[in-house]
Image: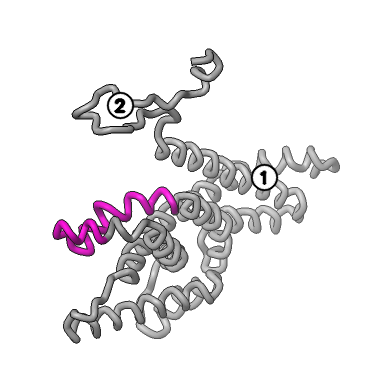
Amino acid sequence: MLPETFWGRIQYLLQQYGSSFLSGAGNTMIIAIVGTFLGCLIGFIVGIIQTIPVDKRDSAVKKTLVGFLKFIMACYVEFFRGTPMMVQAMFIYYGSAYLFNINMSMWFAAFFVVSINTGAYMAETVRGGILSVDEGQTEAAKAIGMTHVQTMMNVILPQALRNIMPQIGNNLIINIKDSCVLSVIGVAELLYKTKAAAGALYMNFETYTITMVMYFIMTFACSRLLRLWEKKMDGADNFDLATTDTLAYTSGMYRYPDDRDKKEGV
């Protein structure tokens, strides 16, 4: 006989379907993490292509090729940003078999859909991060003979990465939540497991309460970890500021005081 109280039903659900919930949550995290990582790689590639400079002195072949690539990248970004992930999953999973006779596995389709969807959003984020870096640094890199790819990899992207880190974290959290739409193609993520438990016991409210708490725990934990990573990228709070040429005047160093020095009156 099923318990009558709310907490009794919660306990009963955890006893009967706890392992199923954990399995679904694990699958959700795998899809979100892998999809976000691959999506970031796609976004960086697309963002670099979108920021390839074209000079008036360049050949017509280069202008045409770069223009064509930018057009393709723009179409990709606009299409996958402008359509829901659920529709994309249905179209790619069933359309690949119907149009091209490709029997795609559910897991491959899940990773593929989340990756290309994330890549479309990340492409614009990366482009904005690249444009936020002072243009003088790009000109200085070109002055010493660096190519566009070398400039991006060694000068621009390391600085842009810090600027776009919050958006990478946002995309990870969004993917954790939006991966639930993949249940429409049969991927056994958390919502899929939730529907199975709710349908078997007719405890919709209690079942989705457990799922809501599990989603919150996953997103909150990822948010805190990413915040710590951002602080680590920022470096130490105290540092040495060179006010003069330190090779000629070693006394020209000013130590930026930390909070402990301020309390001690140093």
Q: Quadrant of residue 256?
A: top left
How far across and down, in percent of the image, does residue 180 sit? 58, 60
Front residue (pair 174, 138): 138
**Residue 149: in magenta span:** yes
Residue type (three-letter) at the residue carrying disc 1 = Val
Would residue 70 be seen by someone viewing this image from the given angle? yes
Q: Disc 2 designates what residue?
A: 252
Residue type (three-letter) at the residue carrying disc 2 = Gly
Q: Residue furthest right?
A: 4
Magenta stretch in the rendered image: 139-163
Q: Residue furthest top?
A: 264
Q: Is residue 42 left or right of residue 147?
A: right
Front residue (pair 7, 2): 7
Give SS at disc 1.
helix
How far across and down, in percent of the image, does residue 205 sit? 77, 52
Q: Is residue 12 above or below residue 129?
A: above
Q: Residues within 10 Å of mark 2 (few under 14, many from 20)?
A: some
Whether label 2 touches label 1, CB < 8 Å:
no
Q: Disc 1 designates what residue?
A: 213
Disc ID at residue 145: none
State the CA–CA distance, disc 2 to disc 1: 55 Å
Residue that appears at 24% across and 52% down: 154
How far across and down, in percent of the image, does residue 122 sit? 43, 62
